[in-house]
Amino acid sequence: MTMKNITVIGSGTMGNGIAHTFAQCGYKVNLVDISEAALQKAINTITKNLDRQVQKGTITEDVKNATLKNITSHTDITKAAPGSDLVVEAASENVDIKFRIFKQLDEICSPHTILASNTSSISITQIAAVTKRPDKVIGMHFMNPVPIMKLVEVIRGYSTSNEVCDLIMETSKKLNKIPVEVNDFPGFVANKILMPMINEAIITLNEGVAGVEEIDTVMKLGMAHPMGPLQLADFIGLDVCLNILRVLQDGFGNPKYAPCPLLVNMVTAGHLGVKSGKGFYDYSSGSKDLVLAERFRKNKVLV
């Protein structure tokens, strides 16, 4: 089977990055979101990122124009998804939302369509169980920023077929990514390791061992991390970190994954990091946001 037509559900940071990447590699992409405003914001973001690539000389103006031409935006999933060879869901990291989307996709998509989730922690086996095609459901966990980061975690659910797994591995390579096959455990590999580290950094701050910049400096200079764990948490989104930690805690039943009360309180207060203007750092002036964002791009930090 040759992949040609791709649908991406969700036009946020991950969704527009995934759409950008597929389109730049020559795939026809339907980008779906519930509002025209969200879709327009996504297209603007993709255009700016393509302009940056042109300025750096990594692509030509012709490639930029062809990439944008390959993307069609939709607010109606029933018109966008049915003819797709692959659907990649990149909606909110919420179990109920994902279950609802996959049930609908299973009903409207062709029998041959592969359904993938960009989930960073939720069980692919559970998602597949709400469909009548569990053998064709798989995880494709891209890293942020998607056009730059090379890794794709390919998560095999309990019923995912060998043929589907092999095809997604091969498709990821055609995107100039490096796919790594992992099994279906809470958090998979990336977040099973990353989130406890971030949580421990928050605990260290909460206990008064050191301040925010001191903790990040120790990890950057002492452990050669390109970005400190608290800065990274701000970029991921503190609400996303909290959701993943709760998935890990529920999935493993181990108190070591319990989110720090400081993280819970910050999310409750609406301090979610870069996207809300305030997290462990203050982004309200925009200056620190720009400095950290540039450092993020230069160092190609995994999220």
Image (spheres, grey):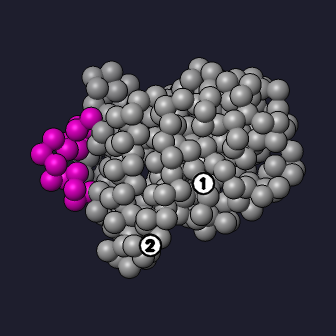
Q: Which residue is mark 1?
A: 28
Mark 1 or mark 2, which is nearer the start of the sequence? 1
Residue 172 drawn at (x, y percent): 67, 60
Q: Secondary structure at mark 1?
A: strand
Q: Residue at x 86, y 52 (%)?
A: 163
* Pick the front one: 48 or 272: 48
Q: Nearer the viewer, residue 167 or 265?
A: 167
Whether residue 17 is in magenta: the answer is: no
Q: Is residue 194 left or right of residue 290?
A: right
Tell me the magenta residue range. 276-292
Locate residue 36, reporting x and y percent. 39, 33
Left or right of 216? Residue 290 is left
Disc 2 element:
helix
In percent of width and height, residue 112 lies at 82, 42
Residue nearest the observer in this picture, 242 or 7: 7
**At 51% across and 46% down in the image, what residue appears?**
72
Q: Position of residue 4 (x, y in %)?
A: 69, 55
The N terminus sits in image quarter: bottom right
As drawn, the residue found furthest toward the left would be 285
> Which amino acid type is shown beneath numbered disc 1?
Lys
In this view of the protein, can residue 200 be seen by the observer? no
For label 2, the crowd category at 10 Å Cα-Cα, with few meaning under 14, some 14 to 19 and many 20 or more, is few
Distance of label 2 from label 1 (alpha carbons): 16 Å
Q: Amino acid at mark 2?
A: Asp
Q: Does the stretch in magenta take in 282? A: yes
Q: Quadrant of residue 174?
A: bottom right
Whether residue 153 sits left or right of residue 277 in the image: it is right
**In the rendered image, is residue 81 in sight?**
yes
- State the residue at coordinates (69%, 36%): 82
Left or right, 78 with respect to 259, comes to: right
Image disc number at residue 62? 2
Nearest the eye: 129 or 224 = 129
